[in-house]
Amino acid sequence: MTDTVLGAAPVRPAPFAPYHKWDRNFFLALVAGVWAGILMGFGGDIRHHIQSNEAAYPWIVHVHAAAFVGWLVLFTTQVLLIRAKRPQLHYRLGASMMWLALFMVIIGPATAIYMQRQQFGTPDSDPAFVAIQFTDIIAFAGLVVAGYRARGRSSAHKRLMLLSTIYISDAGFARWLGSDIGGALGHGFWAFLLSAYLMPQLLMLSLGVYDLVTRKRLYPAYVWGVAWALGLQLTAAYLYIEAPFWKGVATHLIGH
């Protein structure tokens, strides 16, 4: 017999808890994981660049690096402000960060195009790789905009903003662990997908596992955010590995 027949109100699941006592440390640990990927990946590149006495990076690379590291610094500050129970300052800083996000959406593709144009015809030339760089910034922009619009709903806001920051850690992780992962898996679509994105995917997955442990369910914004991220990762891997037309399109995009 149903609840309606019995005259009892239907049982509804408890609302998604906006806060759990473990949140403070877990979310900070995810941010620390992003920092680890960036520092280990780009730190090795910078060290090699200095030791090999290669030419200085172009100015646009420095601007790009400053913008993206600046985002990570400010995002970490936002997490710490919530830990310190300073929500008003968190809110004001968050509004200012949207201007930096807009700049990142511009400088990211601009740097990719500039570098591919400079490297065209050299052993480092790989115009098709802009598929990864373009989809990175599209994923970031979509998640940031969604996160900012959801700023009145803390559960959605912090998950979407965290997903946006995890997504753009792919370049650091790929430089650090990508060659090892790719070497173990071989070549092809799935090998590239995992060598490029496995570590950010694991960080995103850990957030979902954490919610299942602490809330017994996934938050809808998290589900949609991960679907958006995975869809763009699959698109990037398809264009770079499987789509023969893309190299011609990318070559045209960089001005050759």
Image (spheres, grey):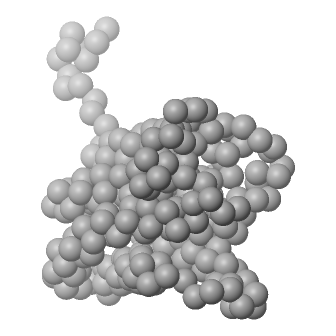
Question: Which residue occupies 17% across, 57% down?
Answer: 149
Q: Is residue 137 above or below residue 7?
A: below
Position in image of residue 41 (x %, y %): 65, 73
Locate residue 109: give its quadrant: bottom left
Quadrant (top left/top right/bottom left/bottom right) for the N terminus? top left
Q: Residue at x 17, y 74 (%)?
A: 95
Which of these two is toward me, 85 or 169? 169
Quick check: 235 left or right of 3?
Answer: right
Residue 195's x, y, as percent? 68, 52
Q: Is residue 101 left or right of residue 207?
A: left
Residue 221 visible from this viewpoint: yes
Query: x%, y% of residue 159?
Result: 36, 58
Is 50 left, or right, of 135 in this rendering?
right
Give the vertical position of 228 relative to 71 (above or below).
above
| Location of residue 200 with respect to 65 vertically, above or below | above
Tell me if 86 is positioned left or right of 174 in this view: left
